[in-house]
Amino acid sequence: MHVCVTRHLLAAPLLAILAATPAMASGFGMLAPHRAVYDLTLKEASDRSGIEAMTGRIVYELTGNECDGISVRYRFVTKITTTDESYQTDQQTSTFESPNGLEFNFLTKSYVDKQLESTVKGTATRTKDGVKVVLSDPKRRELDLPPAVFISTHLIDIINAAENGEQLLKRDVFDGSDNADEVVASSTFIGAGKVVSELLEGETAEALKPIKDQESWPVTISYFEKGLGHTAEQVPVYEASFLLYGNGISRKLVMRYPDYALKGDLISLEMLEKTPCKPAQ
């Protein structure tokens, strides 16, 4: 039994009801280029999951700027022991979102025990009618999906909502994960901002230095199958909780799947040089 761990974090990380399509995805300039490493441990697992032990690591790298667009590289490795077997999963994802938030390129390779199991590659474009997806791998395929935002725009929307004191943000999102053939609905709950300077369990002091005295907000993003409505009884297919900073960095990560949950501790944070915008010709 292979456990599914393919839904993206922030990245997550990471993972929109479209109002007007913006001329520019304003706000990309607030995101700080960085490379963050999270150690993963099993927080809880139901008997139905069959999971006896699970550890892993996430490496999340964000680069780019408001003029050239935002690139995210994301690697999610887990070692899983179930009642029947032990194995390693390795998901490697690269995405790029254009500075106007209208174009999105994505590539995900998934390995089990170092053997390539699947590749998903394609492009997505936001139009006035929705999201046009063109897949080139595993086979050529074109899809017309409902309106949605891409992952970096979604992150900017959450930060803006937090800074404005909003407690709830709803968006439909396309992130290119799984088979890259669907838009998911999301609800983001945002708590009051505060400075959390103390070292949390599992973290390293060195990783905390760049953000130690900055304000952050406790955020929980719940993802739902689109079209089922948002009822009290509806269970999210995936949920991520974390402390979010105004520059896009996160810590104190908890990833919840239907049958298990993982805890992610920030153990390394490297601030990368920001590429300046090229002067207009």
Image: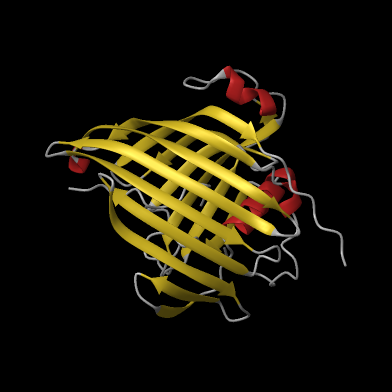
In percent of the image, x 63 and y 39: which residue is there?
34
> In this figure, what is the number of numbered marks?
0
Q: Residue furthest left?
A: 84
Q: Left or right: where does residue 127 sit relative to residue 239? A: right
Judging depth in this view, the residue of 245 and 111 nearest the camera is 111
Q: Position of residue 78 (x, y in %)?
A: 33, 38
Q: Is residue 200 above or below residue 260?
A: above
User: What is the x, y in percent for residue 147?
Assistant: 56, 73
Residue 272: x and y in percent read 67, 38
Q: Is residue 254 above or below residue 172?
A: above
User: Residue 23 appears in which quarter of the rendering?
Assistant: bottom right
Residue 178 located left or right of residue 114:
right
Rendering coords of residue 221 (x, y %): 51, 48
Residue found 66% across the figure and 43% down from its top: 33
Q: Is residue 177 left or right of residue 193?
A: left
- Residue 174 shows in this picture: no
Q: Residue at x 53, y 37 (%)?
A: 242
Q: Residue furthest front?
A: 281
Give the residue at x 44% y 79%. Answer: 143
**In front here: 226 or 93?**
93
Q: Quadrant of the C terminus?
A: bottom right
| Nearest to the observer: residue 88 or residue 132 | 88
Residue 205 showing in the rendered view: yes
Left or right of 207 on screen, residue 230:
left
